[in-house]
Image (cartoon, rainbow, N blue to C red):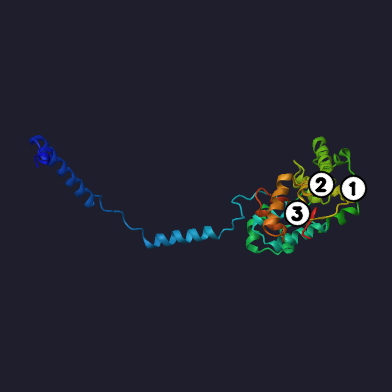
């Protein structure tokens, strides 16, 4: 007992310290127990304002994600799959204009564009003001729908795949640099298979492409057999225009994971795939 008493015997200063410590503990407990935060005095948001915010949010959600806020002027004759998607066109509408152009026909007015594609009036109000046509179209009351046929009556078109740089310099808008660049690009892809490939030549505007097609056409397309995208190997695919080994490997991997490719449009899901080149890639690959 003396042993325990010696340990619990406290001096007057020690006792005061214990009392102060206990008092501080009690004070902190009170602070934690009671809510000393000021009450929220902010006024509630009016229900009408909440509804206005909701309507604004719904209108933003209704905007197509493929459309851009700023639509720059462009020639609708050179719309690609990806460009059409950005404009908000359906797959069927895009296919109609691509099929129309493959026949060698040209669209020369917004009215003709709507007639060929079948797009809605509301979409035409958005994209129509951005349409730009070559100078030779402007001011004509009725431009020809089949450009090649109308011009061939007065000018014999030369072969684009055999034209020299000097030949190309006769086109309005093409100088020494562009003419050599066209020939060099043509050699890199083994010859043009479609006139749409002219759009891949750096520096060629849609207007200049239109000028080229007033004088040249593809008469001797390269003899290339379409490869099956579901059976072609990675090395063979990487040798095709618009592909490299890394992109070919991604396509092969995607094909294996999805047990085949059923449409070219699903290639957009592949990271880094050149979506704006799908119409060109169709010149070298087939689904079966």
Whether pointer 2 and pointer 1 mark residues with C-beta atoms closer than 8 Å, the reply is: no
Q: In the picture shown, does residue 45 fall above or below 222?
A: below
Q: Which mark is residue 211?
A: 2
- Tell me residue 151's x, y (percent): 87, 53
Q: In the picture shown, does residue 172 fall above or below 49?
A: above
Q: Earlier in the sequence, mark 2 or mark 1?
A: 1
Residue at the (78%, 56%) spot, across then down: 231
Q: Earlier in the sequence, mark 1 or mark 3?
A: 1
Whether pointer 1 and pointer 3 mark residues with C-beta atoms closer than 8 Å, the reply is: no
- Tell me residue 64's x, y (percent): 59, 58
Nearer mark to the viewer, of 2 and 3: 3
Q: In the depicted view, which residue is nearer to us: 77 or 3?
A: 3
Whether pointer 2 and pointer 3 mark residues with C-beta atoms closer than 8 Å, the reply is: no
- Tell me residue 9's x, y (percent): 9, 38
Residue at the (22%, 52%) spot, across then down: 33
Q: Which mark is residue 159?
A: 1
Q: In the picture shown, does residue 104 fall above or below 178?
A: below
Q: Which mark is residue 201?
A: none
Dividing the picture into quadrants, the one containing residue 142 is: bottom right
Q: In the depicted view, which residue is nearer to us: 137 or 212?
A: 212
Mark 1 to mark 3 CA distance (whole Å): 22 Å
Q: Inspect this view and state whether residue 93 appears.
A: yes
- Tell me residue 237's x, y (percent): 77, 49
Q: Helix, strand or loop at disc 1?
A: strand
Q: Which mark is residue 279?
A: 3
Dividing the picture into quadrants, the one containing residue 65 is: bottom right
Horizontally, residue 204 falls left or right of residue 191, namely left
């Amino acid at each position: 007992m003396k042993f325990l008493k010696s340990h619990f015997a406290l001096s007057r200063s020690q006792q005061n310290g214990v009392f102060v410590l206990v008092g501080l503990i009690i004070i902190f407990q009170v602070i934690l127990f009671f809510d000393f935060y000021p009450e929220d005095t902010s006024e509630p948001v009016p229900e009408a304002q909440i509804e206005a915010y909701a309507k604004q949010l719904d209108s933003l959600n209704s905007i197509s994600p493929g459309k851009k806020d700023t639509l720059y002027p462009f020639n609708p004759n050179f719309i690609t799959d990806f460009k059409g998607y950005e404009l908000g066109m359906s797959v069927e509408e895009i296919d109609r204009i691509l099929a129309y152009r493959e026949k060698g026909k040209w669209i020369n007015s917004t009215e003709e564009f709507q007639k060929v594609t079948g797009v809605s009036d509301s979409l035409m109000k958005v994209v129509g003001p951005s349409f730009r046509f070559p100078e030779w179209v402007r001011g004509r009351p009725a431009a020809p729908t089949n450009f090649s046929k109308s011009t061939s009556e007065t000018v014999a078109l030369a072969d684009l795949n055999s034209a020299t740089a000097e030949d190309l310099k006769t086109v309005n808008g093409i100088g020494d640099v562009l003419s050599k660049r066209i020939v060099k690009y043509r050699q890199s892809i083994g010859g043009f298979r479609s006139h749409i490939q002219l759009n891949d030549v750096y520096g060629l505007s849609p207007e200049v492409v239109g000028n080229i097609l007033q004088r040249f056409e593809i008469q001797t397309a390269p003899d290339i057999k379409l490869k099956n995208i579901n059976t072609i190997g990675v090395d063979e695919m990487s040798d095709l225009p618009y592909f490299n080994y890394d992109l070919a490997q991604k396509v092969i991997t995607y094909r294996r994971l999805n047990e085949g490719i059923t449409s070219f449009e699903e290639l957009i899901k592949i990271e880094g795939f050149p979506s704006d080149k799908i119409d060109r890639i169709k010149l070298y690959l087939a689904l079966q």
